[in-house]
Image (cartoon, rainbow, N blue to C red):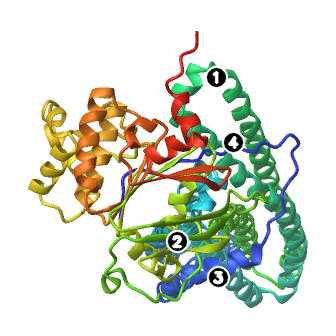
Amino acid sequence: MSQSSSIKTKRPMKHSKNFIADKPKDMKGGVKRLVSYLAPFKFRILVVAFFAALGTVFTILSPKVLAKATDELARGLIAVMTGVGEGIDFTVIGKVLLACVGLYVVSSLFQFVQGFIMADVSAEVAKNLRTSIEEKINRLPVSYFNRVSYGDVLSRITNDVDTINLNLNQTMTQAISSFTTVVGVIIMMLSISVKMTLLALCILPVSAVVVFGIIGISQKHFKRQQKFLGAVNGQVEEMYGGHLIVKAFNGEENALENFKKDNDSLYEASWRASFLSGTMQPLMTFVGNLGYVAVCIVGASMTSNGTMTVGGIQAFIQYIRNFTQPITQLAQVSNQFQAVIAASERVFEFLAEEEMPEIDVKFNVADAELSGQVTFNHVKFGYEGTDKIVIKDFSADVKPGMKVALVGPTGAGKTTMVKLLMRFHDLTDGEILVDGHNIADFDRKDLRSEFGMVLQDTWLYSGSIKDNIRYGKLDATEEDIIKAAKAAQVDHFVRTLPSGYDMIINEEASNISQGQKQLLTIARAILADPRILILDEATSSVDTRTEVMIQKAMDNLMKGRTSFIIAHRLSTIKNADLILCIKDGDIVEQGTHESLMALNGFYAELYNSQFEHVS
């Protein structure tokens, strides 16, 4: 299909007057969906866990090895002080220290490997999520984009996915390392003293209460933070895209006020989320220090009565530090994890949006051999989420090759009818037939391949003029492109441009005029060579002389093709084979220009009103 332009419907952003924290809608579901995206990388994650375990083993062995150096140093000092036995054996201490250095080096290497693997996993997960979002966009109905801000969708594919990518790597590696460290340290502490280990374990329930208590409160603020980040992005996107309109109507203050509402809400949500999560580490440090003090008191008592060596208490104190450190790290990880869950919940919320329903394809365009006959049979339609019926009872029979004009006041339903014809929306009732086949029985993509559309709102993407025209037929040759451009009266002005057909149109297409943009979209439709042509105010943005030239090209293009023309300047459709006069979603008159003028009714009044002069 050649869709030469697209309609962008802007919806006003919704603002929150009062800050009310949203609770996560489906935190467990978000975690499960995220785990499903991690499933293909389970082998690599297992490798990371293995290296994390090995790295932890080498790390937690070092205090006990270092204890031998401490015992040797204590023994030597006592020998020097008492004069009994040999002094400090620095050879033994040197070997012990060298062994510790080796353990630390090996542990660092394992940590590097696990970090490298997890960075790759998180990047691939982010890539897969972006791909899923892009594929989802193509499956969503047009009605979704009529009710959702573009900025919010962009925020999900950029900010939310980036949040998952950046935090997932740190979260998983740190969580695995911290968990294995806790388990390993408990084992090593048990090997030194069961009594002091049980005392140290009293930290765990207190730590759990602190961690889960703060997570329960702060998670809703992380979700709120991501929500308003999307709203702020939507504001920026809308204001940037419509900056000329904003300036023309002096709307800067109103735009800034609306932006401040969402930005203030974002600030408040971010502040609360950061503050609450930030309290976790000092609270955990305080709990850990309590356990540390208790262990020092009990350990000193055991050392004084000879039930534990100096090296043993030194090793155990190191282990208690190593024991509280991963718990504190897990508390920090929980902050990042909350951000990941809040972002993933928004991403999966988007991926769970209702898609265009699958249909049982009964006909293929190639097999149906369509000639272009179109029948509207008691068509009824109302937009989703509204009770208002836009098209009430529309019936018409269009023969192959006919030039059909749809006229009527603004809001009568003219553009809606062509959207229904191309299945941008599904009917509420009735049917539309193409050569006797219900359009609902065709695959949407297959059906639209038979349509060429030129809309009033032009759409060009950032790229060369040549590629923008080629969008109508991707396998077109350069010769085909130039031929279409000449037919659309666009070749001459393109050749006057600095790089001709290779000139790059910028992102906003602001380096060419509105009329030139319209000519390019017409050339695109001509290149597509469709069986059915739809022109929605296609010449509204060009001057009178250019309009006459385009009209001639269009007359040649429409020969032998069924054409639907939406026009407000009725003088341009006087030679139409059939004129359908639409008012409030119904056909009130139909016929040729001459027959309708003879009726001296709705059409005649509409036509004559264009030539009235106000004195």
- Residue 352 in view of the camera: no
Disc 2 is placed on an element classified as: helix
Q: Quadrant of the N terminus?
A: bottom left
- Give 62 or 559, whichever is nearer the viewer: 559
Q: Which mark is residue 12?
A: 4
User: Which residue is situated farthest in the left direction here?
Assistant: 479
Q: Which mark is residue 139?
A: 2
Q: Nearer the viewer, residue 413 or 469?
A: 413
Where residue 168 sits in the image (x, y, percent)? 58, 68
Q: If you read the primary sequence from the N terminus, does the residue marked by circle 1 or circle 4 appear first?
A: 4
Q: Residues within 10 Å of mark 4 (few under 14, many from 20)?
A: few
Task: Report how far apart the C-alphas of labels 1 and 4 lie in the structure.
Answer: 15 Å
Horizontal relation, residue 541 to residue 125: left or right? left
Residue at mark 2 to residue at mark 1: CA–CA distance? 36 Å
Residue 352 sits in quarter? bottom right
Q: Which residue is mark 1?
A: 252
Which quadrant does the C terminus fall into? top right
Q: Secondary structure at mark 1?
A: helix
